[in-house]
Image (cartoon, rainbow, N blue to C red):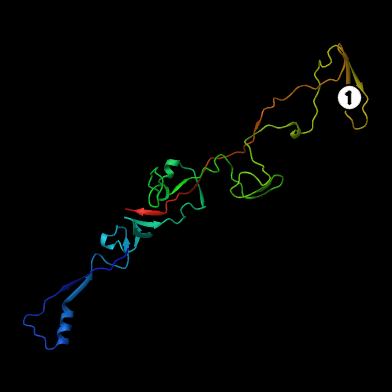
Amino acid sequence: MPTNASIIHQWGNLPDGYEPTNANEFVQQLSKILTSYLAGSYSLFNYGNSTPSTEDQDKPWLRTVSGQPDRWYVFYNGKWVANHEVPASGKERRLWVGTDVELRSYDGGDGSTDTPTETTGAMWEIDTTPAGKFPVFPGDFDASGTVNVGRTDTDTSVSGVDKVTLSQAQMPSHVHGFANDQFGKGKAYLNSPSENEGIVFSAVGAAGAYEPNSDSVGSDEAHNNLPPFYGIYLIKRTNRVYRTIG
């Protein structure tokens, strides 16, 4: 807390044999030989790159780096501190392509792995909420519903997946050929189709009449559904409040 500044008085010497003629003249003479100053290297604020002295901890410090202004600091809980320009635990996010170890020292962090306090620890941390997901701007998909901020599905409960197995209903309409030995030693017959109908086969084999099948194709395997991507971290502010010196 700020305290009253100490004022130091230093007296000079009156001339030898001096005798005042009256009280007013004596006071004026005393004022000429009195020097008063505040303790410490006093100014209304601290300025420069050097850490202010103990006597000046009750005044703010405009710190400079290589002659250029850095920021204002105040002495608090044993350290010179300045509010970080991004609020602690706020909603702002940044992109990060370094490592989590490098992140601990980023933007004023002290490199510690300890849980941050208001004056110690990392300034930023990895936001794990979107891990393994692509960012999407909130809005409407034509066929899947609305994406709201902070959600991983739409309002119609549609979510993205990285691997997909198509059902028969999802496949394009198509036809297949028949195997060469489909009918065995029997005879195949071509029935006359009606208009807009497919060709209908029937066959007679050793076991009697039957309907032939097409060739068997496909393995029911899922296919990869990922677009091209580049891995980055999304980072957020920790609960550390202040930048510190000392």
Q: Which residue is mark 1?
A: 200
Q: Residue furthest left?
A: 17
Q: Quadrant of the N terminus?
A: bottom left
Q: Quadrant of residue 159?
A: top right
The residue drawn where x is 63% and y is 44% is: 153
Q: Is residue 62 visible?
A: yes
Tell me if 14 is positioned left or right of 221 in this view: left
Residue 190 position, x and y percent, is 91, 21
Is 166 rendered above or below residue 109? above
Name the residue nearer the viewer: 89 or 125.
Answer: 89
Is 241 rendered above or below residue 56? above
Is 178 rendered above or below residue 112? above
**Residue type indicated by callout 1:** Val
Tell me if 37 is positioned left or right of 100 in this view: left
Q: Quadrant of residue 100?
A: top left
Q: Residues within 10 Å of mark 1 (few under 14, many from 20)?
A: few
Residue 17 position, x and y percent, is 6, 82
The residue drawn where x is 84% and y is 20% is: 212
Is 239 rendered above or below residue 57? above
Residue 131 position, x and y percent, is 54, 41
Q: How many numbered marks are there? A: 1
Q: Is residue 67 visible?
A: no
Residue 191 position, x and y percent, is 92, 23
Q: Dot 1 lies on which element?
A: strand
